[in-house]
Image (cartoon, helix red, strand yellow):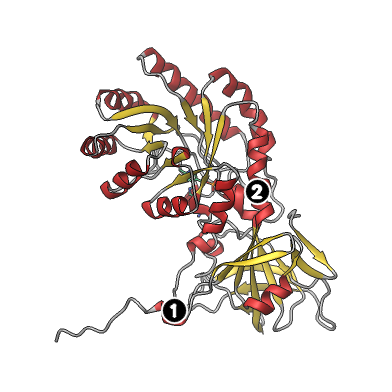
Amino acid sequence: KLPTLSYQQGLLAIEEVSTQQLVQQYGTPLYVYSKKAVLDAYQAYTDSFAEIDHQICYAVKANSNLAVLKVLAEAGAGFDLVSSGELARVLAAGADPSKIVFSGVGKTVAEMKAALQAGIGCFNVESLSELDTLNAVAAELQVKAPISIRVNPDVDAKTHPYISTGLKDNKFGISHDVAIKAYKHADSLEHLDIVGIDCHIGSQLTEIDPFVAALDKVCELIESLKQEGIELEHVDLGGGLGVIYIDEEVAEVSEFANALLPKLKQLGLKVFFEPGRSIVANAGVLLTKVEVLKPTEHKNFAIVDAAMNDLIRPALYQAEMAVIPMSSESQEGSEEQSWDIVGAVCETGDFLAKKRLLSLAVGDILAITGAGAYGFVMSSNYNSRPRPAEIMVSGDKHQVVRKRETVEQLFEGESFFELD
Ligand code: LLP
């Protein structure tokens, strides 16, 4: 299913690297990313939109490892940020500042300053008050801040409610009705330079229609803005294209492009996208070891050494991610049974997968696929668990791109209270 995953001599390999070798060398839990898969997914966007002037701004939040960012920066990608932490990362990875857009509902003054000083390409502004604050910060630095307004097109992205962002109930963007007023206000502020319009309706979208509906709404606004004498240079359609985690029907990037291209050509503006998940999800796996098998009368639990602190998507969104064995040959004498794959964290919600047919033995290695996006980046140290190492693979080579955390690191910033 995943282009860079295959069984070679009965063992799961990522590109040409055996996961068994990685596990022996680095232990588990272990995140592993394929460089080729990242590049191929990026290229699918640039190929699909080759006919028009476009800029792919990878949404850093999906996977912010420096090695991943560097691969994308070298391929010519821009970046979509939501914090000055992400800004520092992309600059460290060699990003071209003019290809950076800064999204987010709560940018702080310090973050605005840092981004203006770096010379980023565009602020995606999400409220009227942000316009005023940004104008003041830009005035202080004696520069003009390039802006887009993030409009909330009020379309149903038909995805999980926690990751749906384009409905009027959501905290994101400026409603369609207020957008013109916001643009006029921006136009009146001396230190803002209106360059575009932006929207993002949600994540893990499997259908194209909501994108088309959002684009239609944005086109209407662009027309109204023209009548007000406000001309734009670009339109940013956000991210959100879904990926196949198990066997979902998901539109491909080329279908997505084919549905949007006629309208985009007519519009004649430069087009930005902010994909995150669809660039990195299926470039990564989380390898984990079966520590305990605990069959009960009701259910069979396989307790593994990864947990919700390492990969929170199943616990947080009931997300279903595929779990495959490292060895394609099942152990002798062990038959396929239904297993709940759970972590060792003291929470009933700590599960990675439910009711999976697998033939398991203690010590087996499992791979959770689709873990390249919103995996490590959402990990925590809950239960004082050091976070996993991250490895990048290219061809037959592999490298640690983030060391496994140590227990000492967990409390190195802490101290005893000494004032009584
Ligand atoms: N642009 C903006 C403004 C966003 O808010 C997001 C994601 C993206 C781009 C990238 O969307 P993507 O292409 O990755 O769908 N943690 C959740 C996903 C949260 C997405 C939040 N916003 C998950 O694990 O499913």
User: Can you say whether 414 is above or below 99 in the image?
Assistant: below
Name the N-terminal-most of marks 2 and 1. Answer: 2
- Near-viewer residue (97 or 311): 97
- Which corner quadrant holds the N terminus? bottom right
Residue found farthest to the left: 420
Q: Which mark is residue 131?
A: none
Q: Quadrant of residue 359?
A: bottom right
User: Can you say whether 152 is above or below 398 in the image?
Assistant: above
Residue assigned mark 2: 39
Pinpoint residue 251: horizontal percent, then vertical percent: 67, 40
Q: Name which residue type carries label 1.
A: Ser
Pinpoint residue 139: horizontal percent, then vertical percent: 22, 35
Name the residue at 28% across, 81% down.
Answer: 415
Name the residue at 84% across, 84% down.
Answer: 333
Residue assigned mark 1: 384
Asked whether residue 174 appears in the rendered view, the answer is: yes
